Amino acid sequence: MVFDGIRMVQVTLTEPAAAKLKELIAKHGTVEDSFLRVYVAGGGCSGMSYGLALDDKVQEGDQVVQDNGVKVVIDDTSAQYLDGSTVDYRETVAGSGFLIQNPNNWSTCGCGKSFNPKGEGAPDAHEGHHHEHAHTA
């Protein structure tokens, strides 16, 4: 989305993710002064990895979006990789956690926390990193 010549990132929180985040935020502050920071860092099995953290400071260049009553903050560099993503929270018998579903991925790794963005070239198929699945963060 472009607003007044500035590209605005779009990130969606599912209702389960928002509910869990509100629960976690309540332990450390309020939804008015605390938010979810979503970011991308270099490294991981496929070249890049996701990060999630609770934060209470907006930095210069951060983009702030709000969905389902929770503020999400993304730094300008990460925004290009996360635009259009959905943050979900799932509880299963195997465990629980936040997942990032990202339409900008070329491939993901079996570890669930790293990805190779579109346009970066496919990883070596012999490494087994060519399948698609959700990302646990």
Image (cartoon, rainbow, N blue to C red):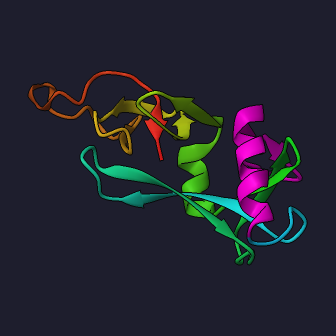
The x, y position of residue 90, in whole percent, is 58, 32
Asked if residue 56 lies in the magenta stretch, the reply is no
Q: Quadrant of residue 37?
A: bottom right
In the image, what residue occupies the spot 71% across and 58% down?
A: 24
- In the displayed structure, 93 sits above or below 65; it is above
Point 81% across, 72% down: residue: 29
Give the residue drawn at x 36%, y 51%: 48
Tell me if I can see residue 10 in this picture: no
Residue at x 82%, y 51% (from the top left corner): 70
Residue 130 position, x and y percent, is: 26, 24
Residue 123 visible in the shown view = yes
Which of the two residues, 8 or 64, is positioned nearer the viewer here? 64
Q: Is 52 in front, or is 79?
A: 52
Of residues 23 and 132, the one drawn nearer to the viewer in this rendering:
23
- Determine the residue located farthest toward the left in the rendered image: 126
Instruction: Decide if residue 86 is on the left or right side of residue 35.
Output: left
Q: Nearer the viewer, residue 74 or 13?
A: 13
Location of residue 1 with respect to 39 vertically, above or below: above
Residue furthest to the top in view is 131
Marks counted in the figure total: 0
Q: Residue furthest front?
A: 93
Let me know if residue 25 is in the magenta part: yes
> Measured from the top left, where is residue 115 in percent x and y?
36, 41
Give the vertical position of 39 relative to 67 (above or below). below
Magenta segment boundaries in residue numbering: 1-27
Location of the N terminus (image quadrant): top right
Taking the image as shown, residue 81 lies to the left or right of residue 124, namely: right
Residue 45 horizontal/vertical position (percent): 24, 47
